[in-house]
């Protein structure tokens, strides 16, 4: 049996190290590429959207596709699970938009000022309508899925001889790290678009998106609840982020560079999933 403390520390390292690397990557992009926001932001948004498209397929797969392939009306427990998944997905999408609007309203009420785009340096200016509230909602959307992952890992820890066995082996472990890196990249892109590039804000976003994995670990060990429900919420989070990101690059001249950026993100997440398989 794996020592729980060792498993927890290993899981935290495998979660937060790649996650924060991913979050920081878009922050360094303007300092390396030296492009204005009109060129850089659509490119990064296209890459992040490509990641999200495959991420949605992946998450909805482990959410049992909201039980769309299951018969309805044959079993009370199955019907209850079916309805619960649908309700959670719906509440997840609506709840994230509600939270975003609520946070923006609270900030506006406390400051009594009109928000204007902030300068990020190197000729970059944050995109209007992208605020730190949007970045928080995006990080939480990723966190829903992370909670489900933590539950799945925690559930198999007691019967595993090593943390690597609990994850599924070397390749699934590598896939997990890559997933966290790419998830962090998506959160980092939203943060950059919102002008939330301070280390304190990036640190908060990393905790919001990564800490649910650790919390899910504790829930999963005693197997208190099925992870499927949180993957349904994770699918909702993916939809929320995609709705926010897609207009950033589709309103531009949709050239081959943006198509290539989208495909880079899509196949990056696909490759990570391929290793897991």
Image (cartoon, rainbow, N blue to C red):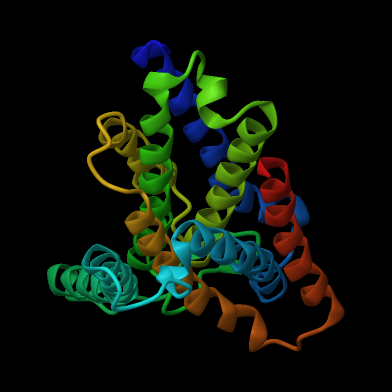
How far across and how far down the image is residue 221, in percent? 30, 29
Relative to residue 222, is residue 272 depicted above or below?
below
Residue at the right extreme of this rendering = 256
Relative to residue 104, is residue 12 depicted above or below?
above
Q: Which residue is at 51% across, 59% downward?
A: 59
Residue 209: in sight, yes or no? no
How far across and how far down the image is residue 210, in percent? 41, 41
How far across and how far down the image is residue 272, in percent? 69, 47
Q: Is residue 82 left or right of residue 149?
A: left
Q: Which residue is at 35% across, 39% downward?
A: 211
Q: Which residue is at 38% across, 55% downward?
A: 228
102 or 180: nearer the viewer? 180
Residue 129 figure quarter: bottom left
Residue 159 figure quarter: top left
156 or 236: nearer the viewer? 156
5 or 255: nearer the viewer? 5
Q: Which residue is at 67% across, 74% downward?
A: 42
Is the N terminus in the top left, top right, bottom left or bottom right quadrant?
A: top left
Q: Is residue 247 left or right of residue 73?
A: right
Q: Is residue 112 left or right of residue 16?
A: left
Relative to residue 175, is residue 106 depicted above or below?
below
Residue 199 figure quarter: top left
Is the C terminus in the top left, top right, bottom left or bottom right quadrant?
A: top right
Residue at the front extreme of this rendering = 74
Relative to residue 10, is residue 87 depicted above or below?
below
Residue 19: in sight, yes or no? yes
């Amino acid at each position: 049996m794996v020592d729980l403390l060792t498993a927890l520390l290993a899981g935290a390292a495998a979660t937060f190290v790649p996650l924060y690397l991913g979050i920081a990557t878009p922050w360094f992009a303007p300092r390396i590429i030296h492009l204005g926001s009109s060129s850089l932001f659509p490119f990064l948004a296209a890459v992040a959207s490509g990641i999200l498209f495959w991420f949605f397929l992946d998450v909805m797969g482990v959410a049992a596709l909201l039980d769309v392939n299951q018969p309805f009306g044959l079993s009370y427990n199955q019907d209850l699970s079916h309805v619960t998944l649908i309700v959670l997905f719906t509440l997840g999408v609506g709840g994230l938009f509600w939270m975003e609007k609520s946070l923006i309203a609270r900030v506006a009420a406390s400051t009594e000022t009109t928000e204007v785009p902030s300068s990020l340096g190197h000729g970059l200016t944050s995109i209007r309508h992208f605020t730190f509230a949007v970045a928080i909602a995006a990080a939480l959307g990723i966190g829903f899925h992370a909670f489900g992952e933590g539950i799945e890992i925690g559930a198999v820890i007691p019967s595993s001889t090593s943390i690597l066995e609990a994850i599924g082996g070397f390749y699934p472990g590598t896939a997990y790290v890559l997933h966290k890196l790419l998830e962090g990249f998506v959160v980092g892109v939203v943060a950059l678009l919102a002008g939330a590039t301070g280390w304190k804000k990036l640190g908060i976003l990393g905790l919001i998106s990564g800490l649910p994995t650790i919390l899910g670990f504790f829930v999963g060990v005693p197997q208190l609840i099925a992870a499927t429900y949180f993957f349904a919420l994770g699918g909702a989070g993916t939809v929320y982020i995609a709705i926010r990101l897609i207009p950033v690059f589709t309103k531009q001249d949709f050239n081959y560079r943006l198509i290539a950026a989208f495909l880079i993100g899509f196949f990056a997440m696909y490759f990570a999933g391929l290793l897991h398989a």
